[in-house]
Image (spheres, grey):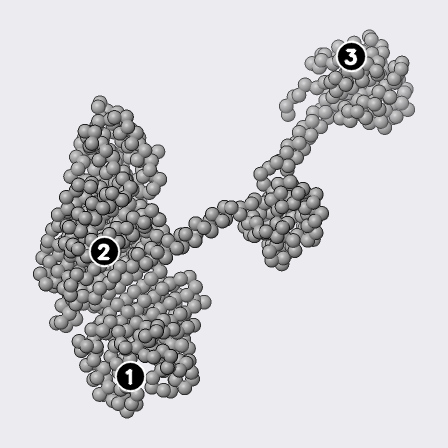
Amino acid sequence: MINHKLNLLVVDDDASLASFISYALTKMSYTPRIASSGKEALALLRDDPADILITDIHMPGMSGLELTEEVLRIYPDTIVIAVTGRGDINIAVEFMKLGGIDFLQKPVNVSALRLAVGSAADRQRLRKELKRAEQNYQNIWESAPIGIYQSSPEGRFISVNPVLARMLGYSSPDEMISSVTNIAEHLYIQPSQRESLIQHILEYGEWMTIEDEFFRKDKSIIFAKVTLRAALNDDGGLLYIEGFVEDITEKKKQEDIFNLEMSRAKEIYDLIVKPQLPMIKGLRINVKCLPAENVGGDVVEFLKISEKCLLIFLADVTGHGIPAAMTANTAKTLFREIAETYTNPAMICRHLNDIVSRITLPDDIIASFCAQIDLEAMTLTYCLCGIPAPIILRNHENICLEPTGFPLGAFHDAVYEDVTLSLSEDDLLVAFTDGITEVRSEKGEIFGLNGVKQSIGKEKHDISSLVECIKESAEDFQQKHSCFQDDVIILAVSLFDEDNGNTCTRPWNRFCSSNKYLLEMKTRHIRIDDVTDFFMGHVAEKSGLSSEKTGKLRVAFFEVLLNAIEHGNLKLTDLKKNPEFFDSEKYRDMFENRMNSEKCGDKLIRIECQYSPEKLEVSVEDEGSGFEVESISDPRANNNISSSSGRGIYIAGMSVDRVMYNATGNKVTLTWMIK
Amino acid sequence: MVTSTERIGNRVVVRILRDIDDLKTGEEFKTVLMELYNKGEKEIVIDFGDTNLINSHGIGKILMFYRRFKSKNGTIYVAPLNDSIREIFESLMLDKLIPEIKI
């Protein structure tokens, strides 16, 4: 405890007694003042009130009792000790009734004096401490930049501080306490919420924080963060609720705006990141995009220059998040524009670098890989500028491409040359951004290009397994699944002889991002069961749902895919209408013939799946002539189950939450709510 | 602190103490390099020490610094690189720009 110097006053008409007491007090290291009468004492106190007053009772003029009464009236915190004659018990009692604290009998004994003054001093110090604490508490209550309240279980405020009253639009705490007669009704948006909140804090038993909307006095809405707890009596019964309230309306507004902007940025990014997947005979494309945040700085694009020529562009902008996505978007748009005039990688990179150096920040770079695959000449011509070495898998040999230039934007006068390699049939080209190579194990080791090479190994890969294999090896290495520190794009392009037997498993174009899955295939390359298995496997992996849960979606998907092939691309509708023909061998032959014909077999099926936490949207699009959506009857009609056409749609309609067609009738979209 | 600097003769050695792989460490690294540039230093050695990762955040800063430094006839080196950093340097062709030097 801080030893504050106490202020003492001794009052006695007997000068020798006064100086005796004063001397004893000086020995106790006080510096008392002395007054010879009650009148003089009051005059001294007026200038400087005392903490402890020691007064004789019997004095001429104003008596000690009168003085005590007067002093305690004016300075109620004063501790008064009386000095009485021996046997003045009645007077002593009267003195104590007036508010005196202690009395000493004459002749005054030094040790009794020390004891009395010592205990008075302790009492006075405690009183001062208490007062200070009270003052501090009062200051906090009045001026803390946070609302503070106590409320009764029935729903009235017991106390509120001025900040809370102001926050909720009341002119004073008193006004708020008197006008809010029912907290649930007046403050809560949903009145029933108060009761459930109280139940909740009673069960929780500690301080709890909620963020919610409340009404102000004028019924405008405040978004507040409330930290509250229940105060209980000894039996555990609820006495009152107390809490702190912060106005977070502005913060919440900023957050909402930010989230809205972010979700729109994500939608834009989803549009940007999805590349074109041109179908070129003898070439297939697989792409996997995994942004580290909602949006990322990696982009990829494929352009069909001719029936025999594909242009590839893979770019990785410094960093991730919105700034990287903005530059990545620019890079991709520029690439498309430049590729309309120039189709060789060196020219494209030269022009890109020229513009990019001017429109990116000085410390941003764009690592890029631009390549042209020419199936006529069987060559790969490429510029490799800062992307980790792409690899060509050929038989049992892996060829790493060598870098050819600096990242775009690094030097405005950089020279870009391209390199040409011969390609072989069955070559598989894989490229990836450094989000894969910089994956790190728990020990801090880097996956690196070696990690990628090892994961590819010497085995024979096909296009559909290669991308997954690299992604999974990187995940195993970091011992964390489906979460990379940086943006990742992995792409694979496979060459295969499409005319002489099918040497490529699942020769489909495929694109996969965090919320989108796209499969594109020629009708001739479809085995319906295999596509269904493959697609449903992906849905199960992505949604984390068991095949039991996704069973109905599988049924609907199968029917819709079958329809797209039979009715759409193979035009078998009329033949199916004749039940005898439909059941004969001839129908099966016809089916096979059309599947393998150039006219029907080359027609595409596009399967697109959009994920969100609540639902899946799966669309299947064919290249048939569609049907008059207006003219068909309700697909859910019961009689469709027995009719030769419409049965598939009926089954699909029964299995998912919604079936929709596009206007042409060649695209069916299934909506399946995840329950 | 992402780096520590030490003067050895005419050279300033910038030792990288932790991976420069995000916006924040990238900016800190940039500040250190720009201070050396503004002080008019002529020879800088970047020492990657035990770190084994630098991504485009750090590389972008090094390239920006390189351009400015060169325009004032400064020389920039790297201390002998470990395999991980060397792989990254080679894929970006930085090995053609910035020679290794023993410190």
Q: Nearer the viewer, mark 2 or mark 1?
A: 2
Q: Element type at marker 3?
A: strand
Which residue sits at x=82%, y=8%? A16
- Asked if one can make out residue B40 in the rendered structure from this viewpoint, the answer is yes
Do the residues at discs 3 and 2 belong to one chain? yes
Left-right relation of A461 to A16: left
Report the chain holding disc 1.
A
Q: Report the residue marked by disc 3.
A: A34
Could you tell me which secondary element the residue under label 1 belongs to?
A: helix
In the image, A668: left or right of A18?
Answer: left
Where disc 2 sits, the SS reads: helix
Above or below residue A31? Residue A645 is below
Residue A38 in the image: state x and y as whole percent: 84, 16
Residue behind mark 2? A336
- Residue at mark 3 shares a chain with residue at mark 1: yes
Chain on which label 3 sits:
A
Cα distance between the residues tagged 3 and 1: 122 Å
Q: Is residue B56 visible?
A: no
Residue A573 is labelled as 1
Q: Nearer the viewer, mark 3 or mark 1?
A: 1
Where residue A579 sits, quadrant-wise, is: bottom left
